[in-house]
Amino acid sequence: MKLGLKQFPLRPRVVAREFGAVARAGRDRRPLAVGGALAAQLRKELVAGGDETAVRIGAPEGAAAYVHVLGGAVREEDERALRAAHQAGVPRLVLARDRSYVPHVLAQDIIVVRPGAGFPIAELAIALVRHAAGGVALAARLPSLRPAVCEQLVRSASIQNGFIGAAVFLPGVDLPVLTLSQLRLVLRIAAAHGQEVGPARLPEALAIVGSALGFRGVARSLAGLVPGVGWAVKGGVAYGGTRALGEAAVRVYQARG
């Protein structure tokens, strides 16, 4: 698709800014800190096939996040470790048998470990994306986290774009916002697979612009066919288009990796 200046939905400086932000996040070398009961076993599962320096036991200071494994009721040493992470300003996640109160940790940051099911690595990965700025960088170094991290990125961007597509009624206003979200999604997926976010990603950025214009055309056509619920059609196309784009990006970078 040939794009003129009037059709191009993102200014070059906006694209450059997004490239720079994702590149900086991808270069984050802060490790994930783990502690508590079975911390050594959790670390072993996390670093399988990846960078062993990406996970350390104890010392939450300077970590991207701190994951604490509770063996049962909260003990004094558990509270001391979580307090240290809190004072260091490090996001805290707890693996526990239930969602009982844990000092210095929000209830939503307690991940339940079901008996005999092993560590919930996928749930932990999703929580890291939600709370830790270094979640994508950790996925680049830890293949054990990568599938769930990428799925969460795709899911969040798709839902966000679905709402934007349904809620924005002024023609042309939604396109730059949707395109920027899709660009950010693809770049973050690339970073999560250890790909350098730089000039080599420019063709993918242009492909995103082309696909965004294509989805917009589909949405306009379908919305005209179903008067009264065009907003729902546009939201559905924005959601589905973003999810399709994200899933395709995951397959491409998996193949490259």
Image: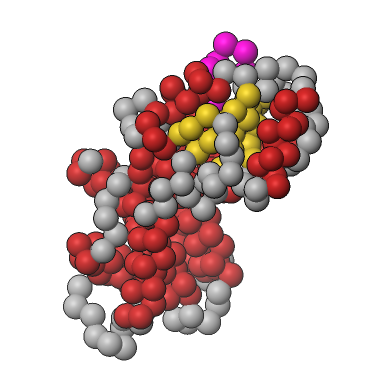
**Whole-percent x and y of residue 116?**
57, 11
Q: Is residue 102 magenta?
A: no
Position of the N terminus by quadrant: bottom left
**Whole-percent x and y of residue 123?**
55, 33
**Whole-percent x and y of residue 141?**
36, 40
Determine whether, in the image, residue 173 is placed left or right of residue 85: left
Question: Residue at the location (22% across, 66% down)?
Answer: 199
Determine whether, in the image, residue 177 is placed left or right of residue 188: right
Determine whether, in the image, residue 220 is placed left or right of residue 230: left
* Residue farthest toward the bottom in the current orientation of the protein: 6
Q: Which of the two residues, 250 or 63, is positioned nearer the viewer here?
A: 63
Q: Is residue 202 above or below residue 115?
A: below
- Whether residue 233 is visible, yes or no, is no
Question: Residue at the location (47% across, 26% down)?
Answer: 43
**Whole-percent x and y of residue 59?**
57, 36
Range covered by the magenta-colored residues:
114-120
Q: Which of the two residues, 73 or 186, is positioned nearer the viewer here?
A: 73
Question: Residue at the location (62% across, 13% down)?
Answer: 115
Question: Residue at the location (37% across, 54% down)?
Answer: 27
Q: Is residue 118 magenta?
A: yes
In which quarter of the view is residue 48 placed?
top left
Q: Which of the two residues, 110 or 169, is positioned nearer the viewer here?
A: 110
State the colouring used for the structure image.
Answer: secondary structure
